[in-house]
Image (cartoon, rainbow, N blue to C red):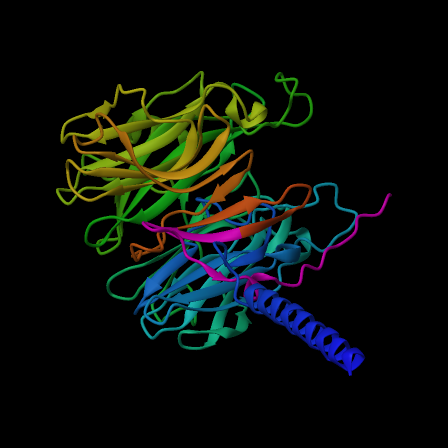
Amino acid sequence: MILNKHFFKILFICFCFLGCASRTKDSKVTSDKNEMVDYFADNGFGNAVAIVQHPSGVYHKGITYVAYQGALEDPYVASYNHTTKEWKGPFKAGTSEMGKDPNRKKKIDNHGKPALLIDDVGYIHIAFGGHGGTREDGDNPLGNHHYGKNLHAVSKKPLDISEWETLDNISPFGTYSQFIKMDNGDIYLFYRHGAHRSNWVYQKSTNNGKTFDEPVSFLKHKRRTDVEAEDSWYPWLSRGNGDDIIVAFDYHICRDNKNSKDTRGHIPERHNLYFMVFDTKKDIWKNVKNESLAMPLTKEMADENALVNSIPNDWTFQAIADVAPNGNPKLIVLVGPDIGAKRSGPKRLQHYRWNGQKWLQSKNTDLPRGNGDLQVTSAKEVSIYLESETNDAIREISRWDSFDGGASFKKNQVFLSRENSGFVISALIENPHPDARIIVGQKEEGSDFRKMYLVGDNGPIKRNKKETILEKPIIKQTNK
């Protein structure tokens, strides 16, 4: 009888232990299943987003739609419903001709990142995949060739990102795609028509992207006679007031690779800062003084009629423009010594503003080193959304505000911060919801993949971890 009592006591303890272990295991499974993370995808590839290819996101009827470069440099699109807090996607929205060659010396090209737009009837458009096209695509009448193919894909249903169709209705010779939709529904697709030695053009659609007019040049490439180089450009275009499209741009001296006086040959050397306006209603281009400009603009014409500031020695990178309600534009550009080649050194944002008579450069030195986008809400209120590095080697996404028209800036909010990490950022999302202003990619150590964040005033929008884990096919390089 005593033995039986001990036996039952031991049996009871075993059952309790097993039950506790089972509950602990179940609790861990449930915890893992419901774990929330602050990124929405883990398959961003290379420089998954950038400011120049824009917009990468649009807020429309309560939902933010975002696009980025995923595995094999293919475009992916996801969406977030701000009411239901529901994520959808990412869905692969097309197939890039880049990123598939295992023998290519440059493993990731990064020039074909998608730009996204929603037309007036709700179809979602992306332009992606190009770095100038190839000779297999035929002669390029407005420039030279390089790699990939500029493509245009459209959702099969309005506001549905799950299925896509690639259309053959834009030039294949494109890169740095930038979409703009006007109030009347007209769609403009701006891009460089080829590799470095090519005109910048736009194609216009008046039927929600079903067809596009032939390319129209607005910045001209041409051979220089004083040095062994060619004129080239890097513009950034966005909506201005009313029917205007505004353009901030810098000049790229495209030096010859061979027999060049510059022993480094072709390097990403850029200089100067320019500004102009495209009145889409009157179909005329003009400078800040409302003087008309002959198109396509040459280097000599730009120097004489569209120059904001001459920067002949330091290098420039990624000019951005926005305009105040009174019509006066404000610009930012990254400036530093030889920043294109060395990717290091003291480079800082410079801010310029038009006061109605002349360009004024802000003399403040409080803006950090970093890359960002500009938002002007009034003649006095200016915000810059930045990816930058602090003195403690911490990378952060932050907003710097000015309340004196840009004469001085102060850091007001940090949205995302990581130590010893690397970020890439998009331009501001079109018509952004306060909770979703910018897309961020964070580099994974020892990998070409990035975690992707949708960041706003309350930091990154969270998602269930299991939904962020995506297939990551890669092409293994082979030795030639």
Q: Magenta stretch containing residue 468, yes or no? A: yes
Q: Magenta stretch containing residue 32, yes or no? A: no
Residue 300 position, x and y percent, is 38, 27
User: Farthest residue in the front direction?
Assistant: 1
User: Farthest residue in the right direction?
Assistant: 480
Q: Quadrant of the N terminus?
A: bottom right
Pick whichever, 369 or 32, lies toward us.
32
Q: Is residue 334 above or below residue 185?
A: above
Pick whichever, 182 or 220, lies toward us.
182
Residue 346 position, x and y percent, is 46, 19
Task: Tell me if I can see residue 194 in this picture.
Answer: yes
Report the number of discs: 0
- Left or right: residue 478 versus residue 22 is right
Q: Quadrant of the C terminus?
A: top right
User: In the image, what residue occupies the spot 38% across and 68% down?
Assistant: 85
User: In the image, what residue occupies the spot 53% across and 73% down?
Assistant: 164
- The answer to which quarter of the image holds residue 362 is top left
Pick whichever, 226 or 5, lies toward us.
5
Residue 248 position, x and y percent, is 34, 38
Task: Tell me if I can see residue 172 in this picture.
Answer: no
Q: Is residue 199 above or below residue 261?
A: below
Q: Is residue 99 above or below residue 471?
A: above
Residue 63 position, x and y percent, is 35, 67
- Left or right: residue 360 versus residue 430 is left
Q: Is residue 292 above or below residue 208?
A: above
Pick whichever, 47 or 295, lies toward us.
47
- The answer to which quarter of the image holds residue 397 is top left
* Residue interval drawn in magenta: 452-480
